[in-house]
Amino acid sequence: MATTADIRNGMCIDIDGQYYVIIEFLHVKPGKGAAFVRTKMRSVTTGRVLERTFNAGVKLDEVRIERRPYQFLYQDDMGYNFMNTETFEQISLAGDMIAGVAFLKEGDMVEVQVHAETETVLTAEMPQNVVLLVTYTEPGLKGDTATNTLKPATVETGAEVRVPLFINEGDKIKINTADGSYVERVKA
């Protein structure tokens, strides 16, 4: 058990059976009345951000969550299969548990969040950016760099990304996995 005095960024707490990670917090001592702690938390399972205020001295259930590196092996009818790179243990996860799953290809590394006491897998996170090969897009014209116009492109995982007009088939591009946006073209 922890109290509001123990709150820190990155701390994970259990509220009504849901796990939340503290993003921001602020201890407030008004001139009149009792002190309180204003927090901003992100749900571990859904990713939603929640603002909550706690009175000073309130007890909180702290949860220990470990982040472990796993390598993506393959996808089958059971879900996405991963292997722990340290223990070689294999797990299967549903697609909705993986943030940025559309950009996942064989051999990619993800960070899996595991509840330390129960060993249950909570979520898996892709790296912030991935580099993928463009497999199909309409041909671009030379000099199409002046405007900010975007066109659809299909990458090697089958996902569709909006890219600038100068991107062609065979180009490697960096993609932000959080929102699926184009970041930059990668030189080979």
Image (spheres, grey):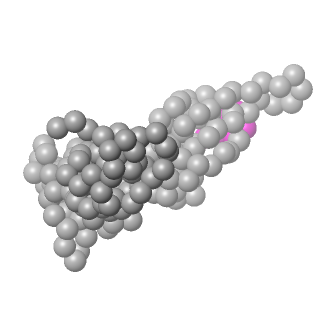
Total labels drawn:
0
Q: Position of residue 80 (x, y in %)?
A: 24, 65
Q: Residue at x 86, y 30 (%)?
A: 33
Report x, y in % for residue 143.
37, 41
* Residue 56 image point, x, y percent: 70, 33
In the image, is 49 to the left or to the right of 53? left
Asked if the magenta segment contains residue 171, the reply would be no
55 to 73, vertically: above or below: above
55 in magenta: yes
Residue extending farthest to the right is 32
Q: What's drawn in magenta, residue-wise? A: 54-59
Q: Which residue is painted at 54% across and 47% down in the image?
A: 42
Q: Residue furthest top?
A: 31
| Residue under the image location 39 percent in, 65 percent down | 96
**Residue 64 in sight from this viewpoint:** no
Q: Quadrant of the C terminus?
A: top left
Asked if residue 139 can be seen in this view, the reply is yes
Question: Horizontal placement of 180 versus 104: left or right?
Answer: right
Q: Closer to the camera, 133 or 80? A: 133
What is the x, y in percent for residue 148? 49, 45
